[in-house]
Amino acid sequence: MNKNIYILDDDTKLNLLLKEYLTNFQYSISTFTHPQELFVKLKSHQPHLLLLDVMLPEIDGFEVLRKIKKEYDFPVIMLTARGDLADKVAGLETGADDYISKPFEPREIAARIGAVLRRNGKKDEDKIMVNTVEIDLKSRQAKVKNKLIDLTTMEFDLLEIFAKNSGRVITRDEITENIKGDEFEPFNRSIDILVSRLRQKLGDNSQKSKIIKTVWGKGYIFIEK
């Protein structure tokens, strides 16, 4: 699966240049010219990494970074036309993972992105982000649109199965084989009830499902987007 890279910079020409160049490295690129556009997007989808310009309309990149770090934990590389050491220190102290001064070569950006993603790779292994759901396998916690939800052990196990197999149909037999519970029997409705409880906690609707879709006669499918 391609890594999602977001770029927030009010220079539309630079955004286009970076998008065209970074696409060659199998990244999926989304660009934004205003902080509010980014904040709206983050409510439903988070990137694997953000390129963030310091000089932005209305609020600067440092304030954007502070807001992001309060709610999210994806890595951020700061971009700036100012080579001031104080700016670099401020960005890193606020939580930036790297800092690049303009002008720069696109290949430098690609190299820095690769390095930061590799450093964060181990952390990423413990997390799954699909649709609007973020799952932390280490802490066994789940969030929907960045809000923590309270799941039982079996509900979390079911969510993990769905998320690890997103985009394909999961049969009831597969669920039975992977979830250990005394109440599970091959022909009762316990699985359907468990799925229904999980749907409710995810804020999903079985009639107009946006996360877990029932495939009649086969099982369920966890919708990727």
Image (cartoon, rainbow, N blue to C red):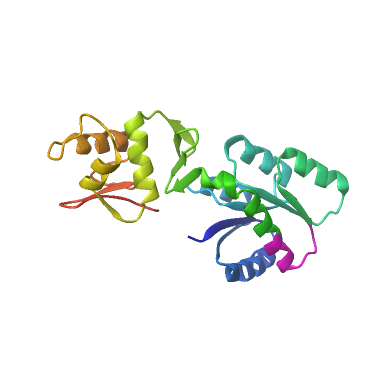
Q: Is residue 121 shown left or right of residue 93?
A: left
Name the quadrant containing residue 12: bottom right
Q: Is 70 or 34 nearer to us in this picture?
A: 70
Q: Is residue 119 visible?
A: yes
Q: Is residue 22 shown left or right of residue 86?
A: left
Total count of labels: 0
Residue at 45 percent of width and 36 percent of height = 143
Q: Vertical placement of 109 versus 166: above or below?
A: below
The residues colored magenta run 101-111
The picture places residue 63, in percent across and down from the top left corner, at: 70, 40
Residue at 63 percent of width and 54 percent of height = 118
The picture places residue 218, in percent across and down from the top left corner, at: 19, 52
The picture places residue 80, in percent across and down from the top left corner, at: 78, 54
Residue at 34 percent of width and 46 percent of height = 162
Q: Is residue 177 shown left or right of residue 70?
A: left
Q: Is residue 60 visible?
A: no
Residue at the far left in the pictured view: 187
Residue 104 is a magenta residue: yes
Q: Vertical placement of 83 versus 180: above or below?
A: below
Q: Is 171 or 87 nearer to us in this picture?
A: 171
Residue at 58 percent of width and 46 percent of height = 122
Residue 218 is a magenta residue: no
Q: Is 163 or 208 nearer to us in this picture?
A: 163
The picture places residue 133, in percent across and down from the top left corner, at: 43, 43
